[in-house]
Image (cartoon, rainbow, N blue to C red):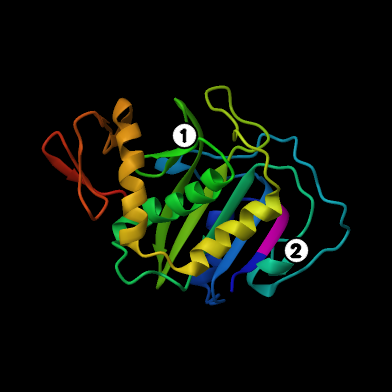
Amino acid sequence: MFKFALAKTISSTQTELIAAIKKGFNENSFAIAALMQTNGIGSCNRVWNSEGGFVIPNSNSSVKNDDFSNVDFIFYDDYSKFNLDIQNNLYISFYSDNIPSDLPIQSASIYYSMIMKLVLQENNSKVFIKWPNDFYIANKKIGGLITSKVKDKLVCGLGLNITNAPNEAMVLDINISYSNLLKAFFDKISYGYSWKEIFEYYKRDFELSRAFYFKSDECVHSLEDAKLYEDGSILVDNKRIYSLR
């Protein structure tokens, strides 16, 4: 079962979790979220900070954990107990001990992005995953996911625009409570979908990616004629490209 920690403010959920793991933090499946990031990390090392406007839950409690010495948490427990009423963008980093045996590690971003997409789709969102790890509605980005291999863990950082978005992006197209969204997401990860199952869903989304471009090694590639392989990699411009980033 996931342990879940929620902070009011943090520099970056991804860098804080990675730093803790490097220092020996070894909790079973774990996730850390924040209502505000001051130095968040997006794909291609872009800055992904909060836009402000978050609503702090009616809680005066402060939970300390020695593995995150610079962070004050307003929740730290099994995710099933999380019921705070929050209206906020999602900034979260996590890892799971329940990694499917057939998952190509280089496609972990696709795997976990698709699990979140399934949660949103089941709640009537029209979101799809643009290769390899961006959440889109129509032609606007609403979020993304990055993955880092740290020791024996796949640490994923995920962001979704739920309440506000930059000018060039948009917000999620459904109303869903913060706690219900996270619980459903952790439930699906814990269920243990195989890569084969998730890839079958993803092949349909990939067709929606063909109208877009992506950047790799400072080069911009069109996805229009890309060939998708079963390990999640693609062939574009006679080059095989993998999605881990």
Between 100 and 57, which is closer to the camera in this rendering? 100
Q: Secondary structure at mark 2?
A: strand
Q: Residue at x 60, y 39 (%)?
A: 49
Between 125 and 100, which is closer to the camera in this rendering? 125
Q: Which mark is residue 112?
A: none
Q: Residues within 10 Å of mark 1 (few under 14, many from 20)?
A: many
Q: Amino acid at mark 2?
A: Phe
Q: Is residue 169 left or right of residue 146?
A: right
Q: Residue furthest top?
A: 167
Q: Main secondary structure of the magenta part?
A: strand
Q: How many angstroms separate mark 2 from mark 1 (CA)?
A: 30 Å
Q: Amino acid at mark 1?
A: Tyr
Q: Indicate which label's residue lies in the foreground, 2 or 1.
A: 1
- Indicate whether residue 6 is drawn in magenta: yes
Q: Residue at x 45, y 72 (%)?
A: 98
List x then y, in percent, for residue 191: 49, 68
Q: Residue at x 51, y 53 (%)?
A: 157
Q: Residues within 10 Å of mark 2 (few under 14, many from 20)?
A: many
**Residues shaded magenta:** 5-9
Q: Which residue is mark 1?
A: 136
Q: Which residue is mark 2?
A: 75
List x then y, in percent, for residue 62: 82, 64
- Indicate whether residue 111 is drawn in magenta: no
Quarter of the N terminus within the rendering: bottom right
Q: Is residue 225 left or right of residue 197?
A: left
List x then y, in percent, for residue 37: 64, 46
Q: Is residue 241 left or right of residue 211?
A: left
Between 225 and 43, which is closer to the camera in this rendering? 225
Q: Residue at x 51, y 70 (%)?
A: 21
